Image: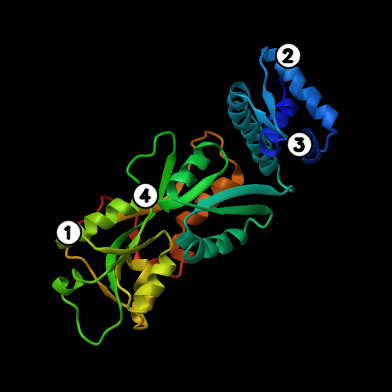
Amino acid sequence: MDLPQLRAILALRELASFAKAGEHLHLSPPAVFGQIRQLEEELGEKLYERLGKRLQLTATGELLAEYAKTIVQQHDDAVRALRGQGGGKRSLLRVGCGPHTSIRILPYLLRAFRETNQSTEIRQTTGDDLGLIRDLRAGILDAVLMTLRPENPELEQLPLWKYHLVFALPPSRRRTTLAELRQLPFLVLHRPVVIDAAVRRHCDDAGFTPAALFESDQPDAIKELVKLGVGATVLPLWSVAQEAGRGELRIIHPRRRRYYSFGWLYRPSKYPSKPLAALLATGARWAEWWPLAEYVSPAAGEERRD
């Protein structure tokens, strides 16, 4: 089997039609049919079946398509990386992050990166942490910017900074005691890899379990609800410090500060592309380009407890 045949089985799975697959691959429908037929003869198995007007892969076809996805992705990655090494030609980096990072961090990072890497195209994907990690392992992404967990098997980590969580409350003229905080409705930030456990631990340290009124993976939406007086939440200090300074909400620091590492996650390689190495290096200079750098701590050294 060869790459055109593998691309044909992937296109057939996605588009369920020889005509549409041929249009996608810039081939005639008979040419796509011929490639699938050659695969069937080589494997001795039927790879698709007709369901009404649609074509659907058989179990064997689905298994082949999964392998084909990995092989084609690795081939395309290799071509992009080698072109990126050659200079002159445009290279491509695919970066993943959460919704908040895409607004409050990534634009400043990319502006700094572009100062010396104008020939590199960046494609950014926003998603949940588990999905981003899955796509990174599959080769769909080159790097992910996120809160790091202690271990990510088969992946490399480059911590950039550490941050701690704070309680964020609606604006008020009087101080809110911890006892009163426990009675407020809670707006919960949901991100399953690290943040969910961190929020629970933060509230446990304060001696209560939050009564969740609203749950979202969009910190900006949660902050707007806090500003409107709907309830309280737990967010990173860097996320709410400027709003607190403007009096739009209030923050309460925990008695015990737990620090969490934020940084790059990427696949290990002895020969990383020059654009990826440059992007990682730009991230490591975060204190130079990030406006919120004063609200976090350097990642180097042991995790602190205050």
Name the quadrant containing residue 20. Answer: top right
Which label belongs to residue 41?
2
Give whichever of discs 2 and 1 has the lower sequence position. 2
- Label pair 4/1, CB-CB below 8 angstroms: no
Q: Secondary structure at mark 1?
A: helix
Q: Position of residue 163 (x, y in %)?
A: 32, 60
Residue beneath disc 1: 205
Circle 2 Cα neighbour tier, 10 Å, few/some/many (<14 / 14–19 / ≥20): few
Which label belongs to residue 21?
3
Q: Secondary structure at mark 4?
A: loop
Circle 4 Cα neighbour tier, 10 Å, few/some/many (<14 / 14–19 / ≥20): few
Q: Position of residue 98 (x, y in %)?
A: 47, 56
Give whichever of discs 3 and 1 has the lower sequence position. 3
Query: Mark 3: which amino acid?
Result: Ala
Q: How many marks?
A: 4
Query: Mark 2: which amino acid?
Result: Glu
- Label pair 4/2, CB-CB below 8 angstroms: no
Depth check, mark 2 against mark 1: the one in front is 2
Query: Mark 1: which amino acid?
Result: Asp
Give whichever of discs 4 and 2 has the lower sequence position. 2
Residue beneath disc 4: 192
Depth check, mark 4 against mark 1: the one in front is 4
Is residue 34 shown above or below 264? above
The residue depicted at 37 percent of the width and 83 percent of the height is 246
